[in-house]
Amino acid sequence: MALDRKIAYIDLTTGKIETKPISLEVRKKFIGGRGLDAYLLYNHAPKGCDPLGPENPLIVSGGLLTATCASATSRTHIMAKSPLTNLLGSCNMGGFFAPEMAWAGFHHLVITGKAEKPVYLWIHNGEIEIRDASHLWGKTCTETQWAIREDHDDQEIKSMVIGAAGENLVTYACVMTGIKNSGGRSGMGCVMGSKNLKAIACRGDMDIKLAHPMDALEHNKKFIEQITSAKVNQTQGTLGTPFIWGATNCWGGVRTRNFQYNQMLYADEIEPEAIDDIATETMGPHHMAGCFGCQVHCRAKYKIQTGPLAGKYDEGPEYTSLGAFGSEPDCRKAETVLSANHLVDQYGVDNLEIGSIISWAMELYELGILTNKETEGLELKFGNDKALIQMIHEICNRSSWLGNVLADGGIPAAEKIGKNSFDYLIQVKGMNNLHSDERATPALALNIATASRGSDHLRSRPAIDLYHLPEKVLRKIYSSPIPYDGPLSSEHTEYVGKPWQVFWQENCYMAVDCLGICKYHTLFLGATLPNFEDWPAVIYYNTGLEFTPEELWYAAERCNNMERLFNLREGLTRNDPYKGDTLNHRYFDEPCRRGAPDVVGRCIDREKFSIMIDEFYGHHGWDKEGVPTPETLERLGLDQEPSHLV
């Protein structure tokens, strides 16, 4: 058996470090990456623990296939109880950190306690040290990584770091590696800051033993062909992920001016082709970059051309940056989007959350709920580019009354602001929605309402629902590896059959996150990309572990239920507007005002949506309140949790 991966338990309070193997029993049940992290969190986080307390475990991992010959296995996963939602905290980022951590000897870290002063972890060829980081505190995310390399005189060190947002305990601070790879959602950078943990640095040249190396290499050639032949990936390799924003905006699927409109007009300067022109002009024709083991190269390299940050280098912007700093605040300048993208990368803060919360504040300002008194004279109006940039600084530095309030997250901010401000907050479980507008797409609305970490497009979104694929094609996809003979519809405005699609995608994305594969290399945006039927051979050739497609499905289902159990234990209930599987009332009460003919006038039907929730719960084997039944827990082997197997 090729698997000899290690897990390390690190107590920053006492300095104790313990290393253990990961048993095959645990691998078969929870695979690795996000799935095993969910098991570890449920087993090691005390019920009701303070997200910013020393007992909250910060868990960092690579997937089962990380650092092997499998394509695009670059993803790093980070999990803890979220300071933003007080429920499951989880984020995922690309780059090169997880493979380097694997070569340094570890696939999972469980970090508890709190250091007396700033520290960083130095992981090198099976050894872990807790080192002083006083000289790193206050540095930006990029500066921190460069300083660690200088400390060790090694330019190949890969680090996972926080910036000022994490240090200042902004509840949606993210973790960063490289220039722009960010674990953005749910505030894992804030958890690092609460532990005085500035960075985790890795460097290693330990072998990752492969079970069948030649077969693994040959099989991966087929995988690469499957991945790169998909038109969606060819487009991403040319325009990057901004192409998704351009396509979605054209038919009316992006929220604008917080949630007043669903399409941004006159956005020529931030269309994907315009952003690509800037990247080409400033960085040359070969301006696309990729992560470890990736052949798609979906992000651009660019320099800001004008304004106070002119000449600064960065990467992106991503699909989410165009929404967070373009359509939501209704800012149309490329300089604004590129500058804001650069600032959040340096501060280390979730672009989706900060863009959404500023846009919410802009609507409150225009409604008179926030006044010049609260903004200290800042005209926080939609389209005010300078105000958007100023609020990023104020939030990340907590340097004003409003910045400090917004840094705590949407729900605490609404409680402080009052005056019905919560009604305008587009959130699920305390996490702001990204810039998409799901009023015309019931399946996508169900996805964000039920996602385990809060409003989310990367937990269960059936993005191919927008492609109008023939029912025969949908049947082939959604009947494997588990047979499904229920209804399916090619119409994205329909409600029937969508709960199964969301359930299927939820298991698919969990499997991907367990393996450490990028979602762009599976059935997310491309209907021909790998899924359950394709993964067993990759796993076997690289690790020697034998899974059937059905076994992978049930492992993913088990891991999703682990996340559900954690959320239920921490207070999730079905209809709770703060901690439930619910949507803001505006989804039901305010129809779409722009876009294609089949979008204008659309909103979510309350009764049909409630039926969708019932069906979704039923597919999971949960009761009407969303609680796994005893039979479901027994079927999945979760009836004895917490079991403390590792």
Image: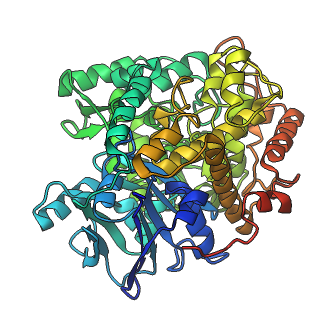
Quadrant location of the N terminus in the rendered image: bottom left
Mark yes or no: residue 307 visible: yes
Residue at 52% x, 44% y is 512
Residue at 79% x, 42% y is 616
Q: In this view, does 390 lie to the left or right of 419?
A: left
Q: Nearer the viewer, residue 14 or 347?
A: 14
Quadrant location of the C terminus in the rendered image: bottom right
Task: Please count the marks in the image.
Answer: 0
Q: Is residue 393 left or right of residue 122?
A: right
Q: Nearer the viewer, residue 329 or 67?
A: 67
Residue at 58% x, 34% y is 533
The spot of residue 550 in percent (x, y) is: 66, 43
The spot of residue 457 in percent (x, y) is: 59, 39
Mark yes or no: residue 377 visible: no
> Residue 360 sits in which quadrant?
top right
The spot of residue 51 in percent (x, y) is: 56, 71
Q: Which of 134 and 333 is in front in this view?
A: 134
Q: Which residue lies furthest to the bottom in this view?
A: 14
The spot of residue 277 in percent (x, y) is: 28, 19
Location of residue 124 with respect to 455 vertically, above or below:
below
Location of residue 413 with respect to 382 vertically, above or below:
below
Location of residue 395 with respect to 116 vertically, above or below:
above
Residue at 43% x, 42% y is 388
Which colour assignment does the render follow?
Answer: rainbow
